[in-house]
Amino acid sequence: MDKKSDAYLRKMLKNWVKRQRPPENGRARLLWDAAHTSHHKIDLSVILLRPQFRSYSSSNDWPQTLFTWVNENSLQLGIQARVI
Amino acid sequence: MSKGAEEMEAISDSELALRLQAGSLEALGVLYDRHRGLVFRTALAITGDAEAAADLLHDVFLRLHRFAAHIDPRRPLEPWLYRMTTNLSYTWVKRRQRWFRPLEDVADWLAGTRKDTPAYQAEMDDSWRQVQQAVSSLPLSHRGVVVLYYVNDLSLQEISEILDIPVGTVKSRLHYGRQALKLSLGLLAGEIITDLQYEFT
């Protein structure tokens, strides 16, 4: 093997890929997408004990209350939720 | 850098992988910052397309998050990242060859922006385009080995484990890939691309 031309080839290829850089907003985009596809179970107590949720509980219609609250807040909290 | 961020930086990949398995997005962010360079470079060298490399970088780390439970935290993370990156890059190249390239050529022809026109050629630096074309003209299996060996400085044994092929096959692909590259770039006759020399100082 010709070591000189091999070293030259290595440097040439490294310099070629170094000309481009990963996107600056890559980390934020990744974390955003990861949070939205997370399969980790959400601890409902964290949600149910929030003051906003307790204010709904004055209503007697609990299923409707839960349905409304989840739909109103799931987007804001960045979680996927479904009430059947 | 905040104290918390500094602490995270000092944590090993194994510990971060464990935290990732427990659902920590912060651990994913630190792993991304630590390894994005190697994933991006590898994807870029195999695909020859910076936009595709950025998308593949995103996909690789999204899969790391998704399949974290299947990763063994006691083993080094880099081989997993290299394996995932090469596999996804191969898929991208094959898909592009099959579907998108002919469509893109037609679109370019209709729009009058064919890639063999002087206007397009002027956009790319000629010498670097020569390197890109030389790498892209290698068969995919040779390209992966060449990229891991020259761009990422991996040993033959490491490449063999990442690509799951015998060391002899790595040697053979590297030999043919190297010869083809040197021939394309005029290195066999000792010819040097003068435009590129200043970069090496």
Image (cartoon, helix red, strand yellow):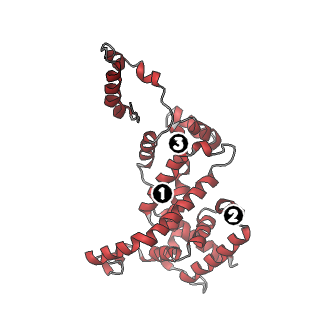
- Tell me the CA gap for discs 2 and 3: 27 Å
Name the amino acid type tagged 2: Ser
Q: Earlier in the sequence, mark 2 or mark 1?
A: 1
Label 3: chain? B
Q: Is residue B89 above or below residue B129?
A: above
Give residue B160's mark. Answer: 2
Name the amino acid type tagged 3: Leu
> In percent of the image, x 45 and y 42: which residue is there?
A37
Instruction: Check if mark 1's residue and mark 3's residue have beta carbons within 8 Å.
Output: no
Instruction: Check if mark 2's residue and mark 3's residue have beta carbons within 8 Å.
Output: no
**Circle 1 residues within 10 Å: few <14, some 14–19, many ≥20:** many
Q: Earlier in the sequence, mark 2 or mark 3?
A: 3
Q: Is residue B14 above or below residue B139?
A: above
Q: Secondary structure at mark 2?
A: helix
Q: Is residue A36 above or below residue B179?
A: above
State the residue lying farthest toward the left. Answer: B111
Image coordinates for residue B129, horizontal then vertical, percent = 45, 75
Task: Specify whether disc 2 shares its chain with disc 1.
Answer: yes
Name the amino acid type tagged 1: Leu
Image coordinates for residue A23, horizontal then vertical, percent = 42, 54
**Rendering quarter of residue B9:** top right
> In percent of the image, x 32 and y 21: which residue is there?
A65
- Tell me the CA gap for discs 1 and 3: 16 Å
Q: Secondary structure at mark 3?
A: helix
Where the C terminus of chain B falls, by quadrant?
Answer: bottom right
Give residue B28's mark. Answer: 3
Label 2: chain? B
Q: Which residue is mark 1?
A: B56
